[in-house]
Amino acid sequence: MITTFVIDDEPIARKGLRTLLSDDPDIEIIGEYTNGSDAVQAIRKLKPQLIFLDVQMPDLDGFGVLQSLSLDEIPAVVFVTAYDDYAIRAFEVNAVDYLLKPFDRDRFQAALRRAKKTLAGQELEGLADKMRALLNDAARKPGSRSVSRFADRMLIKDRGSVRLIKCDEIDWIESTGNYLRVYVGENNYLHRESMASICNRLDPNMFLQISRSRLINAERVTQLKKLPNGCYSITLNPGDVRVSSSRRFAPQVGKFFEELK
Protein backbone atom coordinates (compact mmCIF):
# COMPACT_ATOMS: atom_id res chain seq x y z
CA MET A 1 0.00 0.00 0.00
CA ILE A 2 1.15 3.54 -0.80
CA THR A 3 0.49 5.82 2.15
CA THR A 4 -0.87 9.12 0.84
CA PHE A 5 -1.77 12.63 1.98
CA VAL A 6 -4.22 15.04 0.35
CA ILE A 7 -3.28 18.66 1.08
CA ASP A 8 -5.59 21.36 -0.28
CA ASP A 9 -7.52 24.22 1.34
CA GLU A 10 -10.52 23.79 -1.00
CA PRO A 11 -13.13 21.26 0.28
CA ILE A 12 -14.36 20.40 -3.22
CA ALA A 13 -10.81 19.77 -4.43
CA ARG A 14 -10.04 17.51 -1.46
CA LYS A 15 -13.24 15.57 -1.98
CA GLY A 16 -12.46 15.08 -5.67
CA LEU A 17 -8.95 13.80 -4.98
CA ARG A 18 -10.17 11.58 -2.17
CA THR A 19 -12.81 10.04 -4.43
CA LEU A 20 -10.34 9.36 -7.23
CA LEU A 21 -7.73 7.93 -4.86
CA SER A 22 -10.24 5.67 -3.11
CA ASP A 23 -10.80 3.82 -6.39
CA ASP A 24 -7.22 2.56 -6.35
CA PRO A 25 -6.56 -0.50 -4.15
CA ASP A 26 -2.85 0.38 -3.90
CA ILE A 27 -3.54 3.72 -2.20
CA GLU A 28 -4.13 4.26 1.51
CA ILE A 29 -5.11 7.82 2.45
CA ILE A 30 -3.66 8.39 5.92
CA GLY A 31 -4.08 12.16 6.12
CA GLU A 32 -6.06 15.08 4.74
CA TYR A 33 -4.99 18.65 5.50
CA THR A 34 -6.29 22.12 4.75
CA ASN A 35 -3.17 24.18 5.46
CA GLY A 36 0.56 23.94 5.01
CA SER A 37 1.60 24.21 8.66
CA ASP A 38 -0.45 21.20 9.76
CA ALA A 39 0.74 19.28 6.70
CA VAL A 40 4.44 19.83 7.55
CA GLN A 41 3.96 18.47 11.08
CA ALA A 42 1.99 15.49 9.80
CA ILE A 43 4.55 14.64 7.09
CA ARG A 44 7.32 14.60 9.70
CA LYS A 45 5.27 12.40 12.02
CA LEU A 46 3.52 9.97 9.65
CA LYS A 47 6.04 9.97 6.77
CA PRO A 48 3.64 9.40 3.82
CA GLN A 49 5.14 8.00 0.64
CA LEU A 50 3.07 10.23 -1.65
CA ILE A 51 1.35 13.59 -1.28
CA PHE A 52 -1.05 15.48 -3.53
CA LEU A 53 -0.11 19.06 -2.71
CA ASP A 54 -1.98 22.23 -3.65
CA VAL A 55 0.42 25.06 -4.48
CA GLN A 56 -1.59 28.07 -3.40
CA MET A 57 -2.84 27.87 0.20
CA PRO A 58 -3.14 30.43 2.99
CA ASP A 59 -0.66 30.48 5.87
CA LEU A 60 1.97 28.30 4.12
CA ASP A 61 1.76 27.50 0.43
CA GLY A 62 2.84 24.31 -1.30
CA PHE A 63 6.37 25.52 -1.97
CA GLY A 64 6.60 26.63 1.65
CA VAL A 65 5.61 23.14 2.80
CA LEU A 66 8.46 21.56 0.88
CA GLN A 67 10.94 24.24 1.90
CA SER A 68 10.12 23.45 5.53
CA LEU A 69 11.16 19.82 5.11
CA SER A 70 14.64 18.33 4.93
CA LEU A 71 15.65 16.37 1.84
CA ASP A 72 15.04 13.01 3.50
CA GLU A 73 11.57 14.12 4.64
CA ILE A 74 10.27 15.04 1.18
CA PRO A 75 7.95 12.32 -0.18
CA ALA A 76 6.92 11.85 -3.78
CA VAL A 77 4.86 14.92 -4.70
CA VAL A 78 2.13 15.51 -7.25
CA PHE A 79 1.46 19.24 -7.42
CA VAL A 80 -2.14 20.40 -7.71
CA THR A 81 -2.49 23.93 -9.06
CA ALA A 82 -4.76 26.28 -10.95
CA TYR A 83 -1.80 28.23 -12.36
CA ASP A 84 0.20 27.27 -15.44
CA ASP A 85 3.24 29.09 -14.03
CA TYR A 86 3.59 26.68 -11.12
CA ALA A 87 2.94 23.66 -13.32
CA ILE A 88 5.60 24.79 -15.77
CA ARG A 89 8.17 25.15 -13.01
CA ALA A 90 7.40 21.63 -11.75
CA PHE A 91 7.45 20.37 -15.35
CA GLU A 92 10.90 21.86 -15.97
CA VAL A 93 12.60 20.05 -13.08
CA ASN A 94 10.82 16.77 -13.85
CA ALA A 95 8.93 16.52 -10.57
CA VAL A 96 6.73 13.44 -10.22
CA ASP A 97 3.86 15.24 -11.93
CA TYR A 98 1.33 18.04 -11.62
CA LEU A 99 -2.42 18.32 -11.96
CA LEU A 100 -3.60 21.54 -13.52
CA LYS A 101 -7.10 22.42 -12.29
CA PRO A 102 -9.59 21.54 -13.60
CA PHE A 103 -8.36 18.04 -14.46
CA ASP A 104 -10.27 14.93 -15.51
CA ARG A 105 -10.03 11.29 -14.42
CA ASP A 106 -7.70 10.34 -17.26
CA ARG A 107 -5.21 13.07 -16.38
CA PHE A 108 -5.37 12.08 -12.72
CA GLN A 109 -4.75 8.43 -13.56
CA ALA A 110 -1.73 9.40 -15.65
CA ALA A 111 -0.26 11.34 -12.71
CA LEU A 112 -0.92 8.47 -10.30
CA ARG A 113 0.71 5.95 -12.65
CA ARG A 114 3.78 8.16 -12.88
CA ALA A 115 3.94 8.46 -9.09
CA LYS A 116 3.71 4.69 -8.69
CA LYS A 117 6.45 4.20 -11.24
CA THR A 118 8.69 6.65 -9.40
CA LEU A 119 8.08 4.95 -6.06
CA ALA A 120 8.58 1.46 -7.49
CA GLY A 121 11.87 2.54 -9.05
CA GLN A 122 13.24 3.83 -5.74
CA GLU A 123 14.02 7.16 -7.41
CA LEU A 124 13.13 9.37 -4.47
CA GLU A 125 16.69 10.47 -3.73
CA GLY A 126 17.08 11.93 -7.19
CA LEU A 127 13.57 13.34 -6.98
CA ALA A 128 14.39 15.14 -3.75
CA ASP A 129 17.39 16.79 -5.39
CA LYS A 130 15.22 17.98 -8.26
CA MET A 131 12.61 19.24 -5.82
CA ARG A 132 15.23 21.19 -3.91
CA ALA A 133 16.39 22.79 -7.17
CA LEU A 134 12.79 23.82 -7.79
CA LEU A 135 12.46 25.32 -4.33
CA ASN A 136 15.77 27.16 -4.46
CA ASP A 137 14.83 28.65 -7.82
CA ALA A 138 11.42 29.70 -6.49
CA ALA A 139 13.00 31.29 -3.41
CA ARG A 140 15.14 33.55 -5.59
CA LYS A 141 12.07 35.06 -7.23
CA PRO A 142 10.99 38.46 -5.85
CA GLY A 143 7.48 39.23 -4.62
CA SER A 144 4.88 37.30 -2.70
CA ARG A 145 4.29 34.64 -5.34
CA SER A 146 6.85 31.89 -5.90
CA VAL A 147 7.07 32.58 -9.61
CA SER A 148 7.93 35.58 -11.73
CA ARG A 149 5.28 38.27 -12.20
CA PHE A 150 4.51 37.42 -15.82
CA ALA A 151 4.46 34.07 -17.54
CA ASP A 152 6.95 33.38 -20.29
CA ARG A 153 5.46 30.02 -21.20
CA MET A 154 2.04 28.39 -21.21
CA LEU A 155 0.92 24.81 -20.81
CA ILE A 156 -1.92 24.03 -23.21
CA LYS A 157 -3.87 20.80 -23.26
CA ASP A 158 -4.29 19.68 -26.84
CA ARG A 159 -5.97 16.44 -27.93
CA GLY A 160 -4.99 14.50 -24.86
CA SER A 161 -1.44 15.83 -24.62
CA VAL A 162 0.16 18.90 -23.09
CA ARG A 163 2.03 21.48 -25.16
CA LEU A 164 4.56 23.90 -23.75
CA ILE A 165 4.38 27.14 -25.74
CA LYS A 166 6.60 30.19 -25.35
CA CYS A 167 4.43 33.25 -24.85
CA ASP A 168 6.46 35.35 -27.28
CA GLU A 169 5.49 32.85 -30.00
CA ILE A 170 1.80 33.65 -29.57
CA ASP A 171 0.35 35.91 -32.31
CA TRP A 172 -3.05 36.64 -30.80
CA ILE A 173 -5.74 35.20 -28.56
CA GLU A 174 -9.51 35.23 -28.91
CA SER A 175 -12.05 34.18 -26.30
CA THR A 176 -14.79 31.75 -27.23
CA GLY A 177 -17.20 30.83 -24.46
CA ASN A 178 -15.25 29.47 -21.49
CA TYR A 179 -12.18 28.90 -23.64
CA LEU A 180 -9.47 30.85 -25.41
CA ARG A 181 -8.35 30.22 -28.98
CA VAL A 182 -4.57 30.71 -28.98
CA TYR A 183 -3.03 31.43 -32.40
CA VAL A 184 0.59 30.43 -32.90
CA GLY A 185 1.81 30.71 -36.49
CA GLU A 186 -0.23 28.35 -38.65
CA ASN A 187 -1.58 26.50 -35.62
CA ASN A 188 -4.22 27.34 -33.05
CA TYR A 189 -5.12 25.67 -29.78
CA LEU A 190 -8.19 25.68 -27.55
CA HIS A 191 -7.18 26.58 -24.00
CA ARG A 192 -9.46 26.64 -20.93
CA GLU A 193 -8.90 29.99 -19.22
CA SER A 194 -10.68 33.32 -19.00
CA MET A 195 -9.56 36.43 -20.86
CA ALA A 196 -9.21 38.31 -17.57
CA SER A 197 -6.91 35.62 -16.20
CA ILE A 198 -4.63 35.46 -19.22
CA CYS A 199 -4.39 39.25 -19.38
CA ASN A 200 -3.14 39.29 -15.79
CA ARG A 201 -0.50 36.65 -16.51
CA LEU A 202 0.98 37.99 -19.75
CA ASP A 203 3.43 40.89 -19.97
CA PRO A 204 1.47 44.10 -20.79
CA ASN A 205 4.55 45.47 -22.54
CA MET A 206 4.11 42.76 -25.15
CA PHE A 207 0.41 41.85 -25.10
CA LEU A 208 -2.37 44.35 -25.62
CA GLN A 209 -6.09 43.77 -25.08
CA ILE A 210 -7.96 45.40 -27.95
CA SER A 211 -11.49 44.26 -27.06
CA ARG A 212 -13.28 42.16 -24.48
CA SER A 213 -12.59 39.08 -26.59
CA ARG A 214 -9.21 39.78 -28.23
CA LEU A 215 -5.63 40.05 -27.06
CA ILE A 216 -2.75 40.64 -29.47
CA ASN A 217 1.01 40.34 -29.41
CA ALA A 218 2.01 43.93 -30.20
CA GLU A 219 5.23 42.72 -31.81
CA ARG A 220 3.16 41.09 -34.56
CA VAL A 221 1.48 44.34 -35.62
CA THR A 222 2.44 45.45 -39.14
CA GLN A 223 -0.27 48.06 -39.72
CA LEU A 224 -2.50 50.18 -37.52
CA LYS A 225 -5.34 52.17 -39.06
CA LYS A 226 -7.81 54.37 -37.23
CA LEU A 227 -11.37 54.00 -38.50
CA PRO A 228 -14.04 56.75 -38.77
CA ASN A 229 -15.88 55.30 -35.77
CA GLY A 230 -12.78 55.74 -33.58
CA CYS A 231 -11.83 52.06 -33.51
CA TYR A 232 -8.63 50.62 -34.97
CA SER A 233 -8.08 48.08 -37.74
CA ILE A 234 -4.96 46.10 -36.88
CA THR A 235 -3.00 43.87 -39.26
CA LEU A 236 -0.94 41.08 -37.73
CA ASN A 237 1.89 39.04 -39.15
CA PRO A 238 2.17 36.20 -40.11
CA GLY A 239 -0.73 35.78 -42.50
CA ASP A 240 -1.75 39.45 -42.60
CA VAL A 241 -4.58 38.69 -40.20
CA ARG A 242 -6.88 41.67 -39.60
CA VAL A 243 -8.52 42.24 -36.25
CA SER A 244 -10.44 45.24 -34.95
CA SER A 245 -10.40 46.97 -31.60
CA SER A 246 -13.62 47.84 -29.84
CA ARG A 247 -14.57 51.46 -29.16
CA ARG A 248 -14.09 50.92 -25.43
CA PHE A 249 -10.49 49.73 -25.85
CA ALA A 250 -9.55 52.14 -28.66
CA PRO A 251 -8.02 54.81 -26.36
CA GLN A 252 -5.59 52.37 -24.76
CA VAL A 253 -4.70 50.93 -28.18
CA GLY A 254 -3.86 54.40 -29.46
CA LYS A 255 -1.89 55.26 -26.33
CA PHE A 256 0.07 52.01 -26.45
CA PHE A 257 1.32 52.55 -29.98
CA GLU A 258 1.84 56.27 -29.50
CA GLU A 259 4.29 55.48 -26.70
CA LEU A 260 6.22 53.18 -29.03
CA LYS A 261 7.10 56.02 -31.40
Image (cartoon, grey):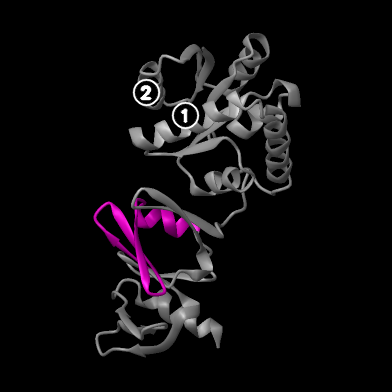
Q: Secondary structure at mark 1?
A: helix
Q: Nearer the viewer, residue 51 or 143?
A: 51
Picture residue at 42% right of the left edge, 81% below the top: 254
Q: Is residue 149 left or right of residue 247?
A: right
Q: Which mark is residue 20?
A: 2
Q: Is residue 107 left or right of residue 136?
A: left
Say which quarter of the image contains residue 151. Answer: bottom right
Circle 1 crowding by C-alpha within 10 Å: few under 14, some 14–19, many from 20: many
| Contact flag, marks 2 and 1 (Cβ < 8 Å) | yes
Q: Which residues are magenta?
A: 173-201
Residue 191 highlighted magenta (yes or no): yes
Residue 255 image point, x, y percent: 46, 79
Give above or below for 115 relative to 156. above
Q: Amino acid at mark 2?
A: Leu
* Comes first in the chain, label 2 or label 1: 2
Picture residue at 71% right of the left edge, 45% below the top: 137
Give above or below for 234 relative to 202. below
Residue under label 1, please give it: 112
Residue 37 image point, x, y percent: 62, 20
Picture residue at 52% right of the left edge, 17% below the top: 4
Give above or below for 132 relative to 28. below
Say which quarter of the image contains residue 41. Answer: top right
Picture residue at 53% right of the left edge, 69% below the top: 168
